[in-house]
Amino acid sequence: MFIRVDISSLPLGKRLAQDIYDFDGHLLISKGIVVQESHLQQLRQRGYEYVYIQEDEDEVNGNSLNQGIDYLTDKQLPKAFSASVESMRQMMDKVSSGHMIKPGEVDESIDIIYNDVIQTYNVIKHLQDLRNKDEYTLQHSVSVGVLSIKIGQSLGLDSDKLRNLGIAGLLHDIGKCMISLDIINKPGPLDDNEFKEIKKHPVYGYQIVNEIKLEDQNIPQAVLQHHEHQDGNGYPLGIRGDRINFFARIIAVADVFDALTSDRAYRPRMPLLQAADIIIKSSCGQLDPLASRRLLSYVLDITTGEKVILSTGEEATVILKNEVDPARPLVRIGDNFLDLKTNRDVFIKDFAR
C-alpha cells in the first residue's frame, strides 16, 4: 500500500512508492529509496508539492513504533498543537491556584506533540496557521517547545535530550502565571515598573519547575536562563557565553523567532525570512551563533520550493535560497524569475495558504 504525503509533512526514513522524474523526463529519485534530507531539498527546489510513500504492513496493522501517527500531518499536527495548548493551560491554572505540577503531567504535555513534531518537516507553516492573538502566552509556549525540538534535531541531539529540550521549551514561560494578567496581556509597550515585574518570570519559572523534581536538571536551568545574552547583558543572572545552559541558548533563539513571527495586539507578525535575518544579526551579542545558524538553515530549507505571497500581492515560488541575505531569495512568478536581492522594493510577506 502507499499514501500521498505533502512535501512539507514528509517524514524522513520512509520509502518512495513511485519513481520521481524531473521536468525533462530524467529520473530524479528511484522508487524504493529511503527518504533523506537531501531528497527533500531536491524536491523542494524543483517545486514538487507531494510524493507517494510506501506504507508498511506493520503500520497498516497498527504494530509499528509510530502507531497512531498520521503521516498526513496537515491533519494531525493541528490536533496535537491544540491539545498541547490545553495541557499548558491546565498546568498554568494549577500553579496559579497554588498547586504543584506532577512529573506525569509534564510527561503527558510533551508526549501529546513530540512524535508529530519529529515527523513533520515544515512545522512553522502549521504553527502560523494555528495562532490567534487571544491565546498568545499559551500558544507561544507550545511553539517555542516545537521550534526548540526542530533546532535540536538539526544539532543531532538524541531522542532523550530532544524530548527534555521540548519540555524545557514548553515550560520556559510558566513563571508568567505568577504575574498579573494586566501586565501579561497589555496591548502595548511596558513601563519601567511593569518591565521589572515581567523580568521576574524566569526566576518564578525556575522555582516552579525545580519543585517538580524532574530528572534532567537542564530543564529548570533552561527555564531560569532563557533570557540570558551571549554578551552578558541578559537577565536574571547576567551570565555570558558558554556559561549559559545549552538548552537555554536553543530556547532563546526559538523564543525570539516565535515572538517576531507572531501577531500581537500592538503589531503584526514579521515575514518569516525577515525574522530569520534578525535572528542572525542578533547572534552577534545576544543569541547563540550555532543555534541561530541552525534555525536560519532550517527556515531557508523549508521555504525553498514553497509558494509565498509577495508584497505586490502576487503568488510566487521560492526557487533558490540566499544565505547571505535570507529575506531576499530568487523566486518564480509563473514563467518569470525575480531576484529579490536586486529588486529591493519587493519582499515576501507570508506563505501562500
Image (spheres, rainbow, N blue to C red):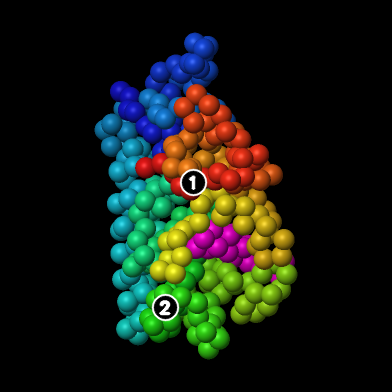
Magenta portion: prevailing SS class: helix
Residue lying at 55% horizontally and 44% vertically, measured from the top left: 346
Relative horizontal placement of residue 304, taking residue 138 as reference (left or right): right
Q: Nearer the viewer, mark 1 or mark 2?
A: 1
Can residue 87 be seen here? The reply is no
- Seen at 67% across and 66% down, the residue is 286
The verdict on residue 249 being magenta is yes
Indicate the quadrant containing the N terminus: top left, top right, bottom left or bottom right. top left
Residue 347 seen in the figure? yes
Point out the tag, 1 or 2, that comes first from the N-terminus.
Answer: 2
Quadrant of the rendered image containing residue 64: top left
Q: Residues within 10 Å of mark 2 (few under 14, many from 20)?
A: few
Magenta-drawn stretch contains 263: no
Where residue 147 appears, as percent x and y from the top left, is 50, 54
Tell me which amino acid carries mark 2: Lys
**Is 221 located above or below residue 83 in the figure?**
below
SS category of the residue bearing label 2: loop
The reply to whether callout 1 and callout 2 are in contact (CB within 8 Å) is no
The x, y position of residue 273, in whole percent, is 56, 48
Crowdedness near tag 1: few (<14), some (14–19) or many (≥20) residues, C-alpha within 10 Å: few
Corner quadrant of residue 217: bottom right
Closest to the observer, 189 or 119: 189
Residue 274 image position (x, y, % from top left):
57, 52
Numbered mark located on residue 186 in the image: 2
Q: Secondary structure at mark 1?
A: loop
Query: Residue tagged by mark 1?
Result: 311
